[in-house]
Amino acid sequence: MTEYKKPLPRPALESEPFWHGCKKHQLLLPHCPHCGSYWFPASVTCPECLNLQWEWKPSAGKGKIHSFGVYHRVYHKGFEPEIPYAVALVQLDEGPRLVSNIIGCSPEELRCDAPVEVVFEDVTDDTTLYKFKLLENP
Amino acid sequence: MSEKFRGKYAIVGVGQSPLGKIPEYGDIGLFAIAAKNAIEDAGLKRADIDGLISHGPDDSYTHHQHVGEALGINASFSTSTDNGGASQVLGVAMACMAIDAGLCNTVVVGYARDAWSRTHRNAEAKALVAANSEAQALKEFGPEFGLFGQPAHYAIAARRHMQLFGTKKEQLGSIAVAFRNHARKNPNAFMRDPLTLEQYMRARMIVDPLGLYDCSVYVDAAGAVVVTSAERARDLKKPPAYVLGFGFGNRLKGWFADDNMITTGAKEAGETAYRMAGVGPKDIDTAQMYDCFTHMVLLQLEDYGFCKKGEGGPFAASGALEFGGELPTNTSGGQLSEGHVQGMLQICEGVRQIRHEHGADRQVKDAEIALVTGHGGNTVCQSAVILAREAS
């Protein structure tokens, strides 16, 4: 694997199981069996009902592009070769919104509300990132 | 219940430091200059000041202590606020509340930041800034996908607004152009070159759909105001700007949560402030709005009730924000052109308009009531204050 030059996630205590899930190509969401809500990122208490006994549940990994911005300015050298690149806010069908990238297409092909599906990129030996691709036949 | 504050307190002095690239002063020095000017503007002496509410760079600790030391004052009430760009309007409201509680009589509220020099003063400054941005940066769910800096949050919001309501980039441009025209009348403004809509459209993109002129301009500067009771205000040098009402809306669940990037906490801030003041959007003669990015002006025009949700684009492009328009806004050039001083200069300009202090070319004719707004903490926190020439 060539040297990976972009920043890697530095997980909060609550996020570590999420990133372990990504490593296994699973998109895990915090889910509260008490009130039924999903949220993201993880927190010690369910933000809906403050229940502490919640669980990680796999997401179906489908959603829509809520919105996106296309970077023309370099903020980090690791992303310089990809300028212009898009950062998208993806609305999962379960409810939470995740910041991510849409791979396999150029920024011009992106539209708000376009359906997307999760894919996983093993970017280093230790880290797998969740990303999304456009769904052609939703 | 909140109406008990209406007209009981006033801003009686405003002051600014020099504005621009001023590497010889740090943020505390800039604050001290602005506070000195505000105290003199009110016709007060330093010994009259017994309250201090300050806000400084994001990495500062007990900021008000450093300011108080520089000003050589002890205070019966002092603190530093932590609502980002919503802090300055919050500071004015907290001053009223502290005086009302009998904790102090006359309060300096101010903000300072050596925003340009922090990144340019010397090699040491550059290293310090790198450390600071590291401390403030997201640690996960952002940088690994290339999400850095402030503009993207507003670009993502602007694109969603465009999707929902057909808002156009040209409409955002009309905001940048209007405020530049105002800055051209203000000798203290940082950006005074002419700006046309064509230049705006041709400018380089930062994070599409936001380009260079959608972003506010970082400068070294400070602003300060003096707040006291209406009774004391009547004996002072300049006409008071009475505080009719204030309000806040803090959508702490986050900018990307719910519909917070479409309808912001400004809606609640405005509703509370209007109710306290006993006025509505139609009564506002001039607005001084927190304009970190053009799109945030557009959202506030909607959320503060000057037009319906989704109509901010056409409203802004109608010329409403210009002198002689329906709602002359950011009449000193705003943060987009005068300089980004975290909304503090918007408060100063609101007071000056209410005092009818400007020459005819920069004065909103017969301005009686001004709305001044702030927002910060990645736009989660919104604050509003309504200032007026008459106490009721």
Image (cartoon, coloured by chain):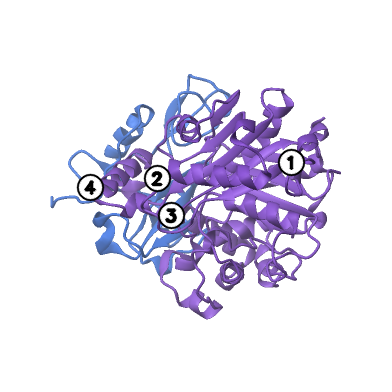
Chain colours: A blue, B purple
The CA distance from mark 2 to mark 4 is 43 Å
> Dot 4 falls on which chain?
A
In the rendered image, which residue does mark 4 sit on? A123
On the image, the x and y values in percent for residue B129 come to 32, 46
- As shown in the figure, which amino acid type bears the numbered disc 2? Gly
Q: Which residue is more in the foreground, B210 or A22?
A: B210
Q: Which residue is mark 1?
A: B10
Which chain is disc 3 placed on?
A
Front residue of B35/B220: it is B35
Dots 1 and 3 on the same chain: no
Mark 2 residue element: loop
* Quadrant containing the N terminus of chain B in the rendered view: top right
Quadrant housing the C terminus of chain B? top right
* Mark toward the viewer: 2 or 4: 2
Q: Which residue is mark 2?
A: B26
Q: Which residue type does callout 3 highlight?
A: Ala
- List x then y, in percent, for residue B298: 63, 60
Three-letter amino acid code at the position of disc 4: Val
Task: Indicate which disc, 2 or 1, sits on the residue closer to the N terminus.
Answer: 1
Label 1 is found on which chain of the structure? B
Are the residues flagged by discs 3 and 4 in contact, CB closer than 8 Å? no
Observer-side mark, 1 or 4, equals 1
Residue drawn at x 62%, y 37% is: B45
Mark 1, secondary structure of its residue: strand
* Nearest to the observer: residue B43 or residue B136: B43
Few, some or many residues within 10 Å of mark 3 (<14, 14–19, 20+):
many
Query: How much space separates mark 1 and mark 4, taking CA atoms?
Result: 58 Å
Name the image quarter holding residue B208.
Answer: bottom left
- Report, in whole angstroms, how far the alpha carbon at label 1 lies from the one at label 3: 45 Å
